[in-house]
Image: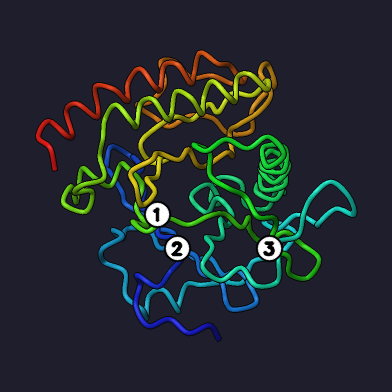
């Protein structure tokens, strides 16, 4: 059985509040993968995420079939990451959506789509877009996307909780300029990101912004499998469009001014 020493060792913990008969009920889902990237998932209703214990997690974890979350690595079109990718970040499946799509190949298809997007971008690199090194392969399936990592380890949105971590890194003009350049590059090659928000922005060791998370990035006009983050789009949408990126950037400027009103 997979070793779990603390709930924080899980690769995903997600809390939701649902209404039932006029009552707000919390439930928490969680996931973890072992050293061979075999995946385990669990859910506990009427429980907040901060109430999880190791015992509760162990009692509720169940193995997941590879085919639900890991696409088959195709014979052509994608790159396998080098055998030694230590020090890199491995992006795994979109666990937060699993409960809504379990029993279907949705997450597998979503990962394959993002792998093709990253492969396309790797041939058209930009300094403000996260670098991609290929697919993590286990059991002839794509179990993750190997990407560059960043010293801070936290996305820009984390600054609302721990602003001191960003001390000396935040240059508001530099962030806006870099992200505008990244988005313009995407648009120039026929893509839209469709999910510009603070959780999808990292800073390198010099404070240069890097756009991440291309799960919603698709050719302009294409129908999307996933799109947007609540609070960062004007209206619900289903087609890839440059207007979604422009709207997100339009919200980012005021967010930066408010969050970093004082230099840190």
Residue 14, label in figure: 1
Q: Is residue 244 left or right of residue 207?
A: right
* Residue 40: x %, y % from top left: 56, 70
Front residue of this view, candidates 9 and 251:
251
Cα–Cα span, label 2 and label 1: 6 Å
Residue lying at the far right in this picture: please name it: 75
Q: Are marks 2 and 1 in contact (CB under 8 Å)?
A: yes
Q: Nearer the viewer, mark 1 or mark 3?
A: 3
Front residue of this view, candidates 11 and 91:
91
Residue 136, label in figure: 3
Tell me the residue at 48%/25% (across/down).
Answer: 181
Q: How is the image coloured?
A: rainbow
Determine the secondary structure under disc 1.
Answer: strand
Q: Indicate the quadrant containing the N terminus: top left, top right, bottom left or bottom right.
A: bottom right
Front residue of this view, candidates 226 and 60:
226
Q: Nearer the viewer, mark 2 or mark 3?
A: 3
Determine the secondary structure under disc 3.
Answer: strand
């Amino acid at each position: 059985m997979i070793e779990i020493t603390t709930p924080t060792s899980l690769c995903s913990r997600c809390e939701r509040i649902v209404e039932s008969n006029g009552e707000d009920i919390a439930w928490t889902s969680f996931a973890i993968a072992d050293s061979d990237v075999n995946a385990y998932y669990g859910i506990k209703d009427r429980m907040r995420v901060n109430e999880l214990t190791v015992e509760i997690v162990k009692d509720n974890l169940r193995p997941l079939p590879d085919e639900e979350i890991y696409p088959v690595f195709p014979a052509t079109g994608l790159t396998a990451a080098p055998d030694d990718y230590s020090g890199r970040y491995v992006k795994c499946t979109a666990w937060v959506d699993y409960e809504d799509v379990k029993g279907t190949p949705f997450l597998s298809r979503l990962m394959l789509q993002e792998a093709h997007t990253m492969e396309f971008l790797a041939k058209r690199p930009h300094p403000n877009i996260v670098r991609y090194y290929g697919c993590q392969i286990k059991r002839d399936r794509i179990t993750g996307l190997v990407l560059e990592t960043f010293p801070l380890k936290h996305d820009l949105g984390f600054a609302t909780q721990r602003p001191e971590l960003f001390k000396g890194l935040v240059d508001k003009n530099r962030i806006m300029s870099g992200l505008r350049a990244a988005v313009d590059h995407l648009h120039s090659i026929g893509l839209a990101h469709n999910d510009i928000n603070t959780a999808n922005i990292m800073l390198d060791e010099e404070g240069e912004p890097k756009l991440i998370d291309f799960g919603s990035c698709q050719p302009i006009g294409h129908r999307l499998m996933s799109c947007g983050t609540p609070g960062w789009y004007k209206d619900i949408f289903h087609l890839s469009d440059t207007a979604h990126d422009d709207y997100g950037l339009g919200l980012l400027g005021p967010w930066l001014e408010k969050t970093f009103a004082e230099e840190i």
